Each structure stands twice: as C-alpha cells, then as structure tokens.
Image (tube, rainbow, N blue to C red):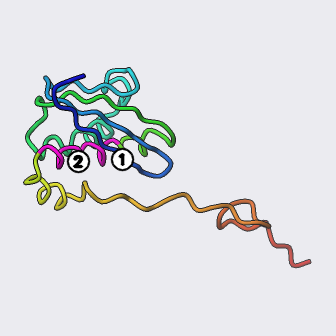
C-alpha cells in the first residue's frame, strides 16, 4: 500500500467515480486504461484536469479512478468532483479556490422520469380533435 493515499468519491447524473490519489508523477488511470484513451476529447480531459490545474499539482499525484454508470460526460464530471474532494483532503487551503470555480458542488441535475400515459418525461402522444 502506498505511503499516503487519499480516497474520494464523486457523482454526476448516473455516473459514480471512486478515486485513489497518491503522491507520484501525474499518471492518471481510469478503469485500467490511460486517461487520454478513456476520455478522448479535449473537453472531457480539460474537465478532469481542471481541479489539478487550479491547485497547481498536475504532476504531483498519481490517480487511479474506478468509474461506472452514465456516459462519458457524466463520468468526467464525477471524476472532477472526486479529484477536487481529494485535493481538499491533501491541503485544506485549496478549498476557497476550488469552491470559487464550482468544483466542490455536486451537480443535482438528473434525468427526469418518464410519466405514465406519455411517451417520455414531457412529450405527449399526438392529440386528435376529431
């Protein structure tokens, strides 16, 4: 087991990300794959790296992520929240900077449930007057 390991959880939509952060060289692994391979677009990669860039610790920690549920966007948001939470455990002084950027707020927006008697959450079946 590494000398110091920081564990945190992040959630967004249906996605859940559990991370283990330990001092290292900046290697990020998601579900056993390289971070760049798992999140191929620059937008998703930027979302995941944002808290590390604000904390100026991009190449300070090795991060192992276990992400499941939801899609790529939700998982990237969940990983971002988990990393931000883990960074606060390492240094409580980072809380202000991370909170200012909104990285510590759990995004409560979820998919609205489908209602009975309708094809979707808000869509109605076609109305026929005659």
- Identify which residue, 29 or 122, lies in the foreground: 29
Determine the image quadrant of residue 129: bottom right
Name the quarter where the C terminus is drawn.
Answer: bottom right
Residue that appears at 40% across and 26% down: 31
Q: Secondary structure at mark 1?
A: strand
Considering every residue shown, the one lying at the far bottom of the view is 129
Which mark is drawn over residue 84? Answer: 2
125 on left or right of 1: right
* The image quarter in which residue 79 lies: top left
Q: Earlier in the sequence, mark 2 or mark 1?
A: 1
Q: Position of residue 113 (x, y in %)?
A: 63, 61
Residue designated by label 1: 10
Q: Badge 2: few (under 14), some or many (20 or more) residues near its Cα, within 10 Å?
A: many
Range of magenta residues: 79-90
Indicate whether 12 appears above or below 124. above
Q: Is residue 77 visible?
A: no
């Amino acid at each position: 087991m590494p000398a110091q390991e920081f564990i945190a959880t992040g959630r967004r939509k249906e996605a859940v990300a559990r991370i283990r952060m330990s001092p290292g060289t900046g290697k990020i692994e998601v579900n056993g794959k390289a971070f760049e391979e798992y999140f191929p677009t620059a937008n998703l990669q930027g979302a995941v790296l944002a808290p590390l860039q604000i904390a100026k610790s991009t190449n300070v920690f090795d991060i192992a992520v276990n992400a499941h549920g939801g899609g790529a966007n939700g998982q990237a948001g969940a990983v971002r929240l988990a990393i931000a939470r883990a960074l606060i455990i390492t240094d409580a002084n980072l809380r202000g900077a991370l909170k200012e950027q909104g990285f510590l707020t759990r995004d409560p927006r979820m998919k609205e449930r489908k209602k009975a008697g309708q094809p979707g959450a808000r869509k109605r079946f076609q109305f026929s007057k005659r």
